[in-house]
Image: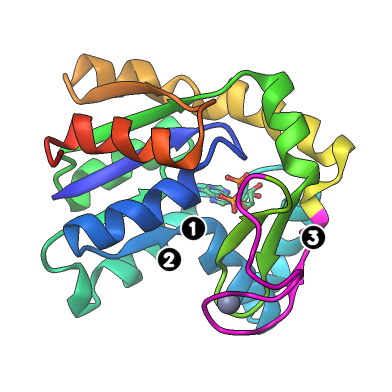
Amino acid sequence: MTLILLGAPGAGKGTRAEYIMEALSIPSISTGNLLREAVKNQTFLGLRAKDLMDAGKLVSDEVVVSMVKDRLMEPDCANGCIFDGFPRTLHQAEELDKITNVDMVISIEVPDEVIEERMTGRRVCQSCGATYHISSAPPKIADVCDKCGDALIVREDDSPEVVRQRLHTYHEQSEPLKGYYEAQGKLRMIVGTGTVEEGQKLIAKVLGIE
Ligand code: ADP
Ligand code: ZN
């Protein structure tokens, strides 16, 4: 099963991906996490991507697609995967169609105002990439990752100005993907404003795993 999670930044793609990953035993591929890893390791690619990411703009299709191609070759992707944050442009979607068969696309719908409020409370583990929210999904110990014990941080691109830019980028470049997948009969839309548990129920329903 190969799934795509669409939705604005902060719509909850990461949280939903973690749930699906466990429910279906398939890995989640987050291009945002892959890019942040490249930035942290100061690879050639990471150095090129950093300024664009900090500004809330998209990294080039070429870079992201080649990163995804490499990741898909790893053995854990043999039975499919969940894409979180990819594809983000029509061109990326077309390239993905050339390398794998997408079964379903779930778009998580959240209004911009809600997104802006959510982002300020977001915390991310700097080691494993797990995400938390200070009020809606807090870690057991403040600022410490439940999964690996490392410190949680606020991402640089979660500042209000950058969040607004990211929303703009999303509406302009990524939202048209809904039409692309709707035309293929693969699009499912779910409400993303409820609790984490409510979100899981909606996901389970569209996946038929209730
Ligand atoms: P978000 O919380 O906005 O969904 P991500 O962690 O998915 O954040 O991505 C962070 C940044 O990484 C994006 O703002 C963008 O600069 C870059 N990025 C991630 N995925 C892609 C992609 N598929 N194409 C282009 N740029 C990407
Ligand atoms: Zn962690």
Which percent across, then down, holds residue 22?
27, 62
Give neighbour class at mark 2: few <14, some 14-19, many 20+ (Cα, 10 Å). some
Residue depth check, mark 2 versus mark 3: number of the one nearer the observer: 3
Give neighbour class at mark 1: few <14, some 14-19, many 20+ (Cα, 10 Å). many
For the residues labelled 2 and 3, the Cα–Cα distance comes to 25 Å
- Range of the magenta residues? 136-156
Q: Of the two numbered discs 2 and 3 on the same chain, state the one appearing first in sequence.
A: 2
Q: Secondary structure at mark 2?
A: helix
Q: Secondary structure at mark 1?
A: helix
The circle drawn on residue 154 is 3
Tag 2 residue:
67
Residue visible at 69% across and 25% down? 114
Q: Is residue 179 left or right of residue 163?
A: left
Q: Is residue 65 left or right of residue 159?
A: left
Magenta segment main secondary structure: loop
Pointers 1 and 2 in contact (C-beta within 8 Å): yes
Q: Quadrant of ligand 2?
A: bottom right
Tag 1 residue:
31
Q: Of the two numbered discs 1 and 3 on the same chain, state the one appearing first in sequence.
A: 1
Q: How many marks?
A: 3
